[in-house]
Image (tube, grey):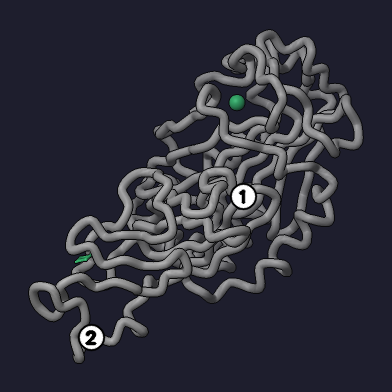
Amino acid sequence: MQETTQDFAALIEREQGLPGRHFTDEAVFQLECRAIFEKSWFCIGLSSDAPAKGDLSPVTVFGQPLLMVRDGTTVRVFHNVCSHRGALLVKTPMHGGPRIVCPYHSWAYKLDGALVATPHVGGAGRHTCPSIDSRGLGLRSVPVAEWAGHVFVNLSGTAPPFEQWIRPVEERFGAIRWDDLRRDPALALSLEVAANWKIICENFVESYHLPPIHAALNAANPMEQHYQILGGHSYVGQGGTGYQPDQVAGAGLPRMVGLADASKYEALVIFPNLNADPADPKSYNFGPTDRLIKAVGAIHASGLTSGSRPSNANSGTCQ
Ligand code: FES
Ligand SMILES: [Fe+2]
């Protein structure tokens, strides 16, 4: 990286964008992974991805396989790697019961990660071995927090306390019933966008592409009535004061509980990777594995009718 933070500050002062290679260079992306994503609280999915005790939900971020585990009311996240010979423990979402069993030699772990079975480790029919101390061979956990139906991890273990990190978001948007959101297979969206993740975030909170790209949405949510939402290093967004969701053809999602004003529209990027849209209930989290972006998780309010698929004016080809 050639630029310094002073260089970036100067670019911002001149209202210029980042140099082009910050959107195309794999080395820059790898640096962002180390310096931003791994050191932040990073959203890896929804609480409802593993709702019942024993539910196991694998997810890979930055090439690292992780495993979300529901243990009673607690969600845990471990490296999805067996302590024996490093086999991948869980490949697809499943209900695993009281134990996580490795598919290779059947070492078994409790839901809190403790190693509890090492079949035949001392030879045929001998399930212990003096030189194997299972107390130090549990699954490796990752710091995890749940907030409003979303699950966050901090891979480096050096992020500020989660409560401190989420406080500005909580203060500004805490009245919204985010945890009503559930993944709906009919609305699920998983796509790779041919653009750098920073473009995706910028696109989500700028409205002046609405008239050419989303003309119908612009009619129901005119860019002239938009305003900026600035939350320092915590979040950024755009809002609109004249939103008329009933005029958006095909949008069947009910509005979320907690929005103060039914005519308001607000879309947020909660740094670094959670995009949320409470006006049309859904959120997206990005789990980049390279400079292409994978956006996951169109969701809607639990128990409410989704109506027709919202492939309307709010979808499109913005890239
Ligand atoms: S690698 Fe998991 S039990 Fe051997
Ligand atoms: Fe768009």
Give the residue drawn at x 69%, y 8%: 249
Q: Position of residue 116 (x, y in %)?
A: 34, 73
Local SS, label 1:
strand
Identity of the residue furthest to the left in this view: 124
Please rate how many residues cluster around mark 2, counting C-alpha atoms within 10 Å: few if below 14, some from 14 to 19, many from 20: few
In the image, taking residue 10 as reference, residue 109 lies left or right, namely left
Q: Position of residue 275 (x, y in %)?
A: 62, 42
Measured from the top left, where is residue 252 in percent x and y? 69, 16
**Residue type (three-letter) at the residue carrying disc 2:** Ile
Residues at circles 2 and 1 in contact by the CB criterion of under 8 Å: no
Q: Quadrant of ligand 2?
A: top right
User: Which label number is shown at residue 150?
Assistant: 1
Q: Is residue 197 above or below residue 302?
A: below
Query: 317 and 137: which one is in front?
Result: 137
Residue 6 lies in quadrant = bottom right
Front residue of 215/165: it is 165
Asked if ligand 1 lies within 8 A of label 2, the reply is no
Question: Which quarter of the rendering shows the N terminus?
Answer: bottom left
Identify the mark nearer the N-term, 2 or 1: 2
The one of 9 and 62 positioned closer to us in this rendering: 62
Mark pair 2, 1: CA separation: 37 Å
Tally of numbered discs:
2
Residue 73 or residue 10, whichever sits in front: 73
* Residue matched to label 2: 132
The furthest residue to the bottom: 130
In the depicted structure, whether residue 22 falls above or below residue 140: above
Q: Identity of the amino acid at label 1? A: His
Q: Is mark 1 within 8 Å of ligand 2?
A: no
Q: Look at 45% across and 42% down and name the residue there.
A: 196
